[in-house]
Image: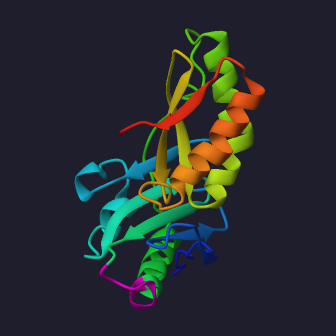
Amino acid sequence: MLQAQKRPVHLYMEANPNPNSLKFVANFMLSDEGLSYDYPNAESTDSSPLAKELFNFAAVERVFIASNFVTVTKSESVEWSDIQDFIRNHIKGFLESGKAAVQVVVNEDPLFDESDSETVKKIKGILDEYIRPAVEQDGGAIVFHSFHEGTVKVLLQGSCSGCPSSTITLKAGIENLLTRMLPEVKAVEAASA
């Protein structure tokens, strides 16, 4: 009798600027390019069986899934050295089973909307091309929220949510780039989710 082979999964861990978050990087895509999924609590995990399972670990406070990685945010009362191998092994086992990390059907491009103004289209383009890759490298995501009277509001997700250095990233990095590239932009602020 033939036995189904497990999917070969290589998973490694990466630290990021948020000491309470750890990025678990897989050797294949977990979500469609440019899409990310933020699960701030167990109740929000309907679209992700993996996130739902990870919240069974008492120390897990947030799960974020994008491209080829899962970022897990733990409670401050626990050290990564005590739980990282359990979480890594659980993610690896889940992915080896062949189950999808996220079960969402996307029918339209979530980034661009035909009703956006030219300025908003430019802002979204800059965020997607220049900023998203850098933020993803740190285990997070940035999502356009709004633009009103010169102020861009963005949502910071994953390891960026609650990160001590996210304010510096927002002001020194994102605001600096957007104000230089688009004179219409005067400030960048974090929006509440």
Where is 38 relative to 114, above or below?
A: below
Q: What residue is drawn where x is 52% and y is 54%?
A: 166
Q: What residue is drawn where x is 69% and y is 32%?
A: 178
Question: Can residue 66 be spotted in the picture?
Answer: no
* Location of residue 78 in the rendering, given as x and y in whole percent from the top left corner: 33, 83
Residue at the right extreme, as displayed? 181
Write the start and end of the magenta stretch as one range: 77-83
Assess whether residue 10 is covered by the magenta stretch.
no
- Count of numbered circles in the view: 0
Assess whether residue 82 is covered by the magenta stretch.
yes
Q: Is 31 left or right of 137, judged from the image as shown? A: left
Residue 59 is drawn in which quadrant?
bottom left
Residue at the bottom extreme, as displayed? 82
Q: What residue is drawn where x is 51% and y is 76%?
A: 92
* Location of residue 180 in the rendering, given as x and y in whole percent from the top left corner: 76, 30
User: Depth check: 132 or 92 in front?
Assistant: 132
Where is 98 relative to 179, above or below?
A: below
